[in-house]
Amino acid sequence: MKDVHFSGEPCPTDTALEQENQVIAEAKNLLYARLQTHGQVLNSPQTVQDYLCLQLSEREQEIFCGLFLDNQYQLIEYRELFMGTINGCCVHPREVVKAALRLNATAVIFAHNHPSHIPEPSEADQHTTECLKKALALVDVRVLDHFIVGGHSVESFAERGLI
């Protein structure tokens, strides 16, 4: 008897899972290469959301990251800054400011995931974003957005008027 999913569909074989994982890895590489291409300007929220979803959606603990940008909004670097637990992550503004200065960034887009797969911003998320905005404003770095990845859904602070 074959193993089945709750949906009644047969379970994928190990070979099928390996093939899926390879396709996912290739998609990540292609999207990362697109973002890293010299002259690539991050003017499409959907491209950024797709990239962040690929990076963060399946992580089992909260990861807080930054997309550091130059004055033309070209990606300098994607960096995972802090790793937390299943329901929280401690973010240190001092370390974020240091990273922005080291990279000579003039803007940053933040993102983190909710392993619960619910991308709703919490009060703590909003407070952290406000603290980071204030700290980075002191060194002339703009916070453009903060995305929360919950499963395959992504919420934008900017689209909600929270930034």
Image (spheres, rainbow, N blue to C red):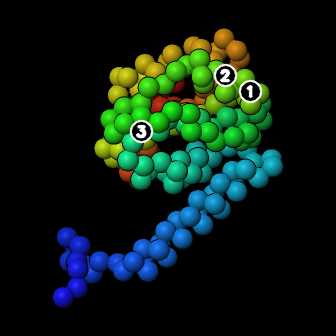
**Disc 3, disc 2: CB below 8 Å?**
no
Q: Which residue lies at the image location 57% right of the left edge and 13% below the top edge?
A: 134
Where, by quadrant of the figure, is residue 121 drawn? top left
Tell me the SS state at disc 2. Answer: helix
**Disc 3, disc 1: CB below 8 Å?**
no
Q: Which residue lies at the image location 51% right of the left edge and 54% below the top edge?
A: 54
Question: Does residue 55 appear anywhere in the picture?
Answer: yes
Judge whether 50 appears above or below 98 on screen. Answer: below
Tell me the SS state at disc 1. Answer: helix
Name the spot of residue 77 as percent of width and height, x first.
69, 40
Answer few, some or many: residues within 10 Å of disc 3's Cα (few below 14, many 20 plus, some between 14 and 19). many
Three-letter amino acid code at the position of disc 1: Arg
Question: Does residue 133 appear anywhere in the picture?
Answer: no
Residue corresponding to mark 2: 98
Query: Which label sits on residue 62?
Result: 3
Query: Mark 3 or mark 1, which has the lower sequence index?
Result: 3
Is 33 left, or right, of 13 in this rendering? right
Tell me the SS state at disc 3. Answer: loop
Q: Which residue lies at the image location 41% right of the left edge and 39% below the top edge?
A: 62
Q: Nearer the viewer, residue 120 or 32?
A: 32
